[in-house]
Image (cartoon, rainbow, N blue to C red):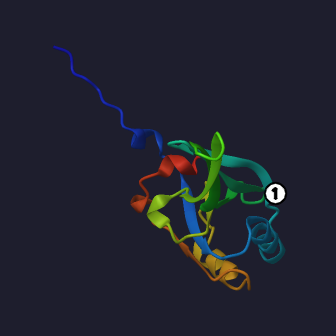
């Protein structure tokens, strides 16, 4: 009898990255702008992260920046988006009536209150995450920022941007 080998998804997700949470009510493009201004980064808009849940398709804003000196990628992604769904219903006055619903979608459901994430892929050993967080906290548009413990994230597949 041959032994069966089971490969879990976590075996494939051995990516080296740091994850930061950002709380701010500002739009994504404004966050990217102030990060670029205060941190001397060059975040630019790329294709949105799209996610299908049930009948809803959500698009999360994504900005990327590659640091040539440190040889690592930075990703700024929105955690919350509002989507609209249109339902058609039969009415007595007209054949169909459109009912529009607004729904909140969350990219990482374990952190519903977080507005944005910064993912830093393959950070160098000399990279100081605490200094980086302190610089972010000094930005007026940002309420707070902190590091996320990756072991608490169940939906890691939503953080694959490359």
Residue 7 position within the rendered picture, expressed as x and y whole percent measured from the top left: 35, 32
122 up-or-down from 7: above or below: below
User: Around disc 1, counting alpha carbons within 10 Å, would you say few (fewer than 14), some (14 to 19), or many (20 or more)?
Assistant: some
18 up-or-down from 162: above or below: below
Residue 52 position within the rendered picture, expressed as x and y whole percent measured from the top left: 56, 42
In the image shown, does 126 or 58 lie closer to the viewer? Answer: 58
Location of mark 1 (residue):
44
Determine whether, in the image, residue 5 is placed left or right of residue 127.
left
In the image shown, does 58 or 8 lie closer to the viewer? Answer: 58
Residue 154 falls in image quadrant: bottom left
At 79% across and 55% down in the image, what residue appears? 45
Residue 88 falls in image quadrant: top right
At 49% across and 51% down in the image, what residue appears? 156
In the image shown, does 111 or 71 lie closer to the viewer? Answer: 111
Q: Is residue 162 visible?
A: no
At 29% across and 26% down in the image, what residue appears? 5
Determine whether, in the image, residue 80 is placed left or right of residue 150.
right
Determine whether, in the image, residue 141 is placed left or right of residue 33.
left
Residue 132 falls in image quadrant: bottom right
129 up-or-down from 64: above or below: below
Outermost residue to the top: 1
Determine whether, in the image, residue 156 is placed left or right of residue 135.
left
Residue 41 position within the rendered picture, expressed as x and y whole percent measured from the top left: 80, 66
* Numbered label tally: 1
Q: Quadrant of the N terminus?
A: top left
Residue 130 position within the rendered picture, expressed as x and y whole percent measured from the top left: 58, 77
Q: Is residue 6 visible?
A: yes
Circle 1 SS class: strand
């Amino acid at each position: 009898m041959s032994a069966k080998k089971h490969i879990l998804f976590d075996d494939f997700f051995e990516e080296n990255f740091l994850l930061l949470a950002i709380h701010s009510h500002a739009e994504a493009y404004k966050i990217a702008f102030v990060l670029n201004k205060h941190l001397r980064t060059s975040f630019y808009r790329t294709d949105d992260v799209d996610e299908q849940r049930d009948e809803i398709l959500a698009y999360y804003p994504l900005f990327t920046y590659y640091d040539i000196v440190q040889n690592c990628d930075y990703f700024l992604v929105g955690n919350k988006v509002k989507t609209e769904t249109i339902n058609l219903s039969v009415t007595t006055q007209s054949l169909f009536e459109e009912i529009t619903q607004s729904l909140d979608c969350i990219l990482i459901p374990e952190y519903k209150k977080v507005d944005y994430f910064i993912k830093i892929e393959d950070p160098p050993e000399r990279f100081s995450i605490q200094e980086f967080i302190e610089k972010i906290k000094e930005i007026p548009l940002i309420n707070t920022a902190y590091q996320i413990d990756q072991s608490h994230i169940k939906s890691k597949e939503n953080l694959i941007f490359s």
